[in-house]
Image (cartoon, coloured by chain):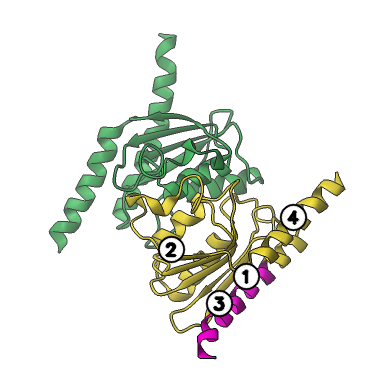
Chain colours: A green, B yellow
Amino acid sequence: MAGHRPEMVFRSHMQAALDEARAAAERGEVPVGAVIISPGGHPVAAAGNRTRELADPTAHAEILAIRMACAMVGSERLGGHDLYVTLEPCAMCAAAIAAARIARLYYGAADPKSGGVAHGARVFAHPQAHHRPEIYDGIAAVESERLLRDFFAGRRADV
Amino acid sequence: MAGHRPEMVFRSHMQAALDEARAAAERGEVPVGAVIISPGGHPVAAAGNRTRELADPTAHAEILAIRMACAMVGSERLGGHDLYVTLEPCAMCAAAIAAARIARLYYGAADPKSGGVAHGARVFAHPQAHHRPEIYDGIAAVESERLLRDFFAGRRADV
């Protein structure tokens, strides 16, 4: 039974990230959500995408969550912290994750179109990143993809 | 004589970016500075690196300048705007420049250690970037490198 505990824990954190993604969709933002977990296992930041609301192209869920967690911790480094995000981070967010020294990155759906971890720039694959988190992908990917698909299908229906 | 005008203009904008880099050094930050110029040729944002002061790993000069310019313009897109930065942008900043649809990127010194434009992730070389600015490098590179070298030499002397 004990072997089941870790998976339950990280699925629960990803559910919190999915809740942020759903809230983003309700605000008319591309539904991506992120949470950051402290070394002690507690959520210290949660954010959804707010690029439109804030008129800020850097206001991706991961960037907002990292800035929030750094403000909480009072440091530009988040060593020992884990980041959960519903979609593969883009190159901007991947490089921010490296700069923040996030220990573990858990993400949901792959993003062949804009991803920068397993696709395109593959930010962590170069020594210029200075830090590479442990990476776990595909967690709750089906729910994450469904949110994105429904959001874009809805937008097409509005046109 | 008219042929000299454009170079004088972009050197003057880079001098403003160097002023921001010098101010950053005086605050104890890695000396990198950036300015953003409107389509009409006017500066709309200027920033230096503030990662330590703000305890924010995303507070690079380029990110702060992009957020400032977007707030001025009221849009997450800066089409027609130019960005001048004293050092080759990292992968995070390069991807933010792509997301903001910056028209032209002028940078000073190359950054083999942390750069993400001509080194490492080469963010604009992948279709996941969605936008590639025109890129002009090496402008005022000597002054930019001297600022960085003096800053790090000073820090070593403090140890």
Coordinates of residue B41 in the picture (x, y in percent) = 49, 83
In the rendered view, would you say A14 is above or below B105? above
Q: Earlier in the sequence, mark 4 or mark 3?
A: 3
SS at circle 4: helix
Please give the chain letter of the residue carrying mark 1: B
Mark 2, residue position: A54
Instruction: Looking at this view, name the residue that lies furthest to the bottom.
Output: B1
Magenta stretch contains residue A10: no
Mark 3, residue position: B10
Q: Can residue A11 be seen?
A: yes
Query: In which image quadrant can residue A69 be found?
Result: top right
Residue located at (56% from left, 34% from top): A81
Please give the chain letter of the residue carrying mark 2: A
Q: Are marks 1 and 3 in contact (CB under 8 Å)?
A: no
Q: Are labels 4 and 3 on one chain?
A: yes
Query: In which image quadrant can residue A11 be found?
Result: top left
The kind of residue on which mark 2 rests is: Leu
Q: Are labels 1 and 4 on one chain?
A: yes
The kind of residue on which mark 1 rests is: Ala
Horizontally, residue A136 falls left or right of residue B86, namely: left
Q: Earlier in the sequence, mark 1 or mark 4?
A: 1
Q: Earlier in the sequence, mark 1 or mark 3?
A: 3
Between residues B28 and A73, which one lies in front from this camera angle? B28
In the rendered view, would you say B130 is above or below A88? below
Residue at mark 4 to residue at mark 2: CA–CA distance: 37 Å
